[in-house]
Image (cartoon, helix red, strand yellow):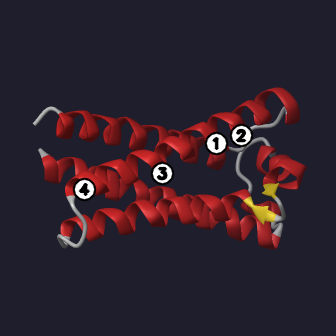
Amino acid sequence: MKNKTIWSILVLAGFGLADSIYLFIFKLSNNTAMCLGNGGCATVNASRYSELYGIPVSLLGVFANLAIIIILLLEIRNIITEDSSNLLVFGVSLVGILFSAYLTYIEYFVIFAVCPFCVASAIIMTVIFIISSFRLVQNLNR
């Protein structure tokens, strides 16, 4: 079961990394052709909420997903303990889900535009959080 949860999170974080890189490229290039659907990506990308202290929010997503991947790879190679890995992945995903919830609120109730790639990122981080919570509880119960 341990390997299934690790690999599930790794795959999800890989998708999250790809999504965040896509959004980061979109932010840098401002290429509206990259925006799918109703054009919400362009609206969200142009908003003041797309950056935090001058750092694109998508770059924060890149770092978060990379951190999760690195932590799990270090656990697989027995460089860090399973206990440490569980807590670190849980912590990163908790911050990620809280920040994603805030950004989703901003999209729906402040900007009134929805970026499907941002929603995908939030969903991925939510699933990572759920699996990491399961891993943490399972680890505490052994």
The answer to whether marks 3 and 2 mark residues whose Cβ atoms lie closer than 8 Å is: no
Q: At which x and y percent is residue 1?
A: 11, 44
Element at label 2: helix
Of the residues shown, which amino acid type is indicated by label 2? Leu
Residue at image point 79% right, 43% down: 40
Q: Which residue is tagged 2?
A: 103
Element at label 4: helix
Q: CA distance from mark 3 to mark 1?
A: 11 Å
Q: CA distance from mark 2 to mark 4?
A: 27 Å
Q: Which residue is tagged 1?
A: 99
Q: Is residue 63 above or below residue 8?
A: below
Q: Which label is found at residue 7? A: 4
Q: Is residue 77 above or below residue 60?
A: below
Q: Is residue 81 above or below residue 2?
A: below
Element at label 1: helix
Q: Badge 2, how many Cα within 10 Å: few under 14, some, many 20+?
A: many
Element at label 3: helix
Q: At which x and y percent is residue 118?
A: 65, 46
Of badges 3 and 2, nearer the viewer stands 3
Q: At which x and y percent is residue 98?
A: 59, 37
Of badges 2 and 1, nearer the viewer stands 1
Q: Of label 4 and label 1, which has the lower sequence position?
A: 4
Tally of numbered tags:
4
